[in-house]
Amino acid sequence: MEEDSENILKFHSLSFKILLPLHLEHNFKLYLIVSESLTNIKPR
């Protein structure tokens, strides 16, 4: 069971490393939008 989740984790980090450069610009814009939204929602 533990080995399974470890493999899944490795797979996700691998696909993340592959996908991130491909979609970096898009992801960054999305990240900015999301973080801005979260910042606006958070009570100060």
Image: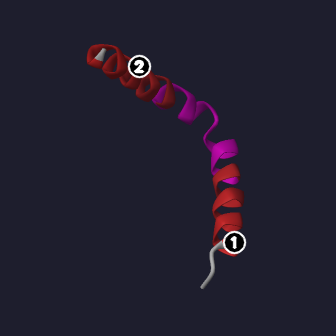
Q: Residue at x 28, y 19 (%)?
A: 2
Considering the image in quadrants, where does the N terminus appear?
A: top left
Q: Position of residue 4 (x, y in %)?
A: 34, 14
**The quadrant where residue 24 appears:** top right
Type of the residue with mark 1: Ile
State whether residue 14 is above or below residue 20: above
Type of the residue with mark 2: Ile
Q: Residue at x 63, y 62 (%)?
A: 35
State whether residue 13 is above or below residue 38: above
Q: Residue at x 68, y 67 (%)?
A: 36
Q: Nearer the viewer, residue 35 or 4?
A: 4
Answer whether residue 40 is magenta in the image: no
Q: How far, Cα to Cα, is label 2 from label 1? A: 33 Å
**Residue 5 - label:** none
**Residue 8 - label:** 2
Q: Is residue 19 left or right of residue 12?
A: right
Local packing at callout 2 (Cα closer than 10 Å; few below 14, some 14-19, many 20+) is: few
**The quadrant where residue 25 appears:** top right
Residue numbers of the magenta segment: 17-29
Q: Residue at x 42, y 29 (%)?
A: 13
